[in-house]
Image: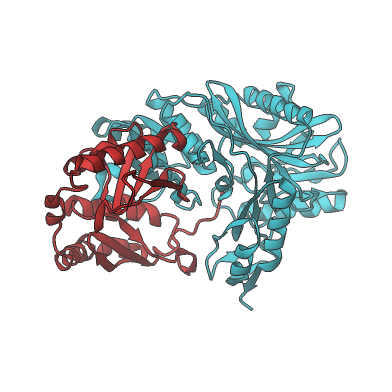
Amino acid sequence: MPRLLLMLPTRTYRTPSLLAAAARCGVELTVASEEDSSVAHLNPAGFLTLPFSTPDACALPVREFSRQYPIDAVIGIDDLVVEATAVVARSLDLPHNDPDAVAGARDKKRSRQLLAAAGVACPEFVWRSFDEPGRDLPPEFGFPAVVKPLDLSASRGVIRVDDGEQLTAAVERVEAIVADEAKYLAESGFLVESFVSGPEVAVEGLLRDGVLEVLAIFDKPEPLEGPYFEESIYLTPSRLSESQQAELVETSAAACLGLGLSEGAVHIELRVTGAGPVVIEVNPRAIGGLCSDVLKFGTGLTLEDLLLNHALGDRAPLPERVDRAAGVLMLSVGGGGTLERVEGIEAAEAVSGVERVAITAHPGQLLQKWPEGGAYPGFVFASGSTVAEVERSLNAANATLTLIYES
Amino acid sequence: MSDEVQITGEPMTVPTMCRFTVDRPLYPDQSFHFGSAEAAEMSPLASRLFAIEGVAGVLITDNRVTVTKHGPTPWPEVGPQVGASIREHLASGDPAVDPSVRESIPPVDVLRDRIQGILDREVNPSVASHGGVVRLLDVKQNMVYVQMGGGCQGCGMADVTLKQGVEIAIRSEIPEVGEIMDTTDHASGNNPYYAPSKK
C-alpha cells in the first residue's frame, strides 16, 4: 500500500476532508504538521513534525523519515505548506512544482513582476517599504488604488483607497496589521496597485505536467468594490458567456505558465473587464476554507479525492463536475467581537436548496472585521437546478443567521 | 417471497459508499465490518465482494450490505457486480460471515475495559498536555463510541488525533474492534487547542 505524506497545518479547515479522501484512496498515511502531535508516540509512522515556515529545512527530516517509512506521494494544499510541499516532493524525486515558482506565486510583488514579464494582464503596481519617506505618495497610475501586504491571505490587510488621504491612513493601518503578524517581515513592504473594477471570478484548476485542467469557474455575485474585501458567495457554473469563460481559462493558463507552476492545485482570482480578464492572484493551492465542499465530480468524488489521486500519480482523464448548480456562502463576521453563539442555524438548514450549514468559529473566539480579520465564522452550502436558485437559497439562509457576540 | 432476489441500491451521503438492501436476511440481527480483503477471509459474502475491482470495505448488517469503493469505476458499473455477487452468495448457501468470526470478538465488558485501559494509559496522559481528553462513551457489539473534550473539542487536529493516534492504538491492541465513532459536537468546543482559521 503506498504511503502518502499529508502536509497539514494545525489550523486548517481541511483536516476531515483530507483524511476522508486519504482513507478512500486506501493509502498508508503520515501526517506532517508544524507542531508536535500529542499522540505521535502511538503511531511513529503516522506523524512527522516539520518547520513549514522554513521550507528548505523540511527536506532533510522527510528524507530521513522516508528511509524507514518510504513515502510514495506528497500533498499539501494550504497556503502555509505549499512551499514546503514543493521542497519535500523535489527532495524525494516525486512530481512537484518548482519551489521557486511557488515562492514567487505566494509573494505578491514577485508574482506581479513575473506576470507582467509574461505579458499576463494584471494590475499596475508599485512596491514600497514601510520605512521609506515617500511610502504614501500617490502612485503614478493614480486612484482608485489598493494597498496590499505581500504575504497575508484571505484579503487580510487589503484596502482600497480613492485619494492621498485614504492612502496615508491605509498604509498606517496595514503596517499595524503586519506588525501584529509574527511571521510577517516588515521589511517585505507592501504593494500599491491599481484597482481593477469589474466582476470577480475564481478559477479552480489542477496542473498536470504543466497543463491547466479547469475544474470549475466560480462567479462571485456580490460586488467586491472595497474598501475591504471580505468575500461572500461563490457560484458555479459561471454565468459568463462561453467566450468570456474561454478567455478566463486562457489567461489562467498563461498566468500559471508565467509563474512557472506545473503541478497540483491552483486557485486563480481574476476580474472581468471590458478589455478582458485581469489576474488578481494565482495561488498554488486549492480553494480556501471549507469551500471545496461545494465541488463534486463524476460519481461524487471530492476535490480532495482528485488532488490526492493526482499526487499518487493518477493521470487518467478527470471526471466532469456534477451537472448541478452549486454555491457556498462565507458568513460575514458582521461587527466582529468575541463570539457567543450563532442563531438561526436550523432555519438556515431548512431553506430549500441548502445542503449544509457549517459553523467553524467556536464560542469564545475573537472574530475581527476585515481588513484586520481573515477568518470566516462559517459556511453555507447549497445546490439547485440553476445558479440563480442557488444564490436565492444562500441569501435566504444568510438572512436567518445571526452572530451573537459577547457584550 | 419470490425466488428472484430483489436488491435495491441506495447511494449514500459519502459518495464512495453505496447501500444495497436485499429482500431477505443475509446476517440476521448482526453486523460486521470488513476493511480489507484479508480481514474478509472468514466471510464468504465479503470475500466475493472484495473480488470486485475497487471495493475497499464491506459492512454486512442484517439484510443490508454497505460497500465502500475507491477508483474511477462509477456506481452504475459497480452496482450490478455487487448485486450479482450477493445473488451468487445466496445461491451458494454459505453463511454471510463464518460463526467463528463473531465468536472471536471479546464480550462487550471485556472490550470496554481494555479500551478504557488504553485511553487511561496511552492516550489521555498525552492529550492532557493540550488540555484535551478522550472519553469512552459506549461499546455496542464491537462498535466503539468516543467523545473528545477540552482542547480536543473543535480542535483542527482532532480528526488526526483520533484516526492516526487513538484508532491505531486501539486496533493494534484489539484488532476485533469495529467502527470507532466520534460523537463529539466539535462546533460547541469553546477552547480548541488549534482553532481552524486560515486558508
- Nearer-the-camera pick, B146 or A239: A239
The residue drawn where x is 74% and y is 22% is A119
- Asked whether residue A344 appears in the rendered view, the answer is yes
Q: Position of residue A227 (x, y in %)?
A: 79, 53
| Chain A painted colour | cyan
The residue drawn where x is 62% and y is 39% is A323
Left or right of residue A104: residue B48: left
Q: Position of residue A378 (x, y in %)?
A: 59, 59
The residue drawn where x is 52% and y is 39% is A303
The image shows residue B56, relative to residue B162, as above or below, that is: above
How was this image coloured?
by chain
The residue drawn where x is 45% and y is 62% is B154
Left or right of residue A217: residue A206: left
Q: Which chain is red?
A: B
The image shows residue A378, relative to residue A346, as above or below, that is: above
Marks counted in the figure total 0
The image shows residue A22, relative to residue A73, as above or below, that is: below
Q: Position of residue A138 (x, y in %)?
A: 85, 42
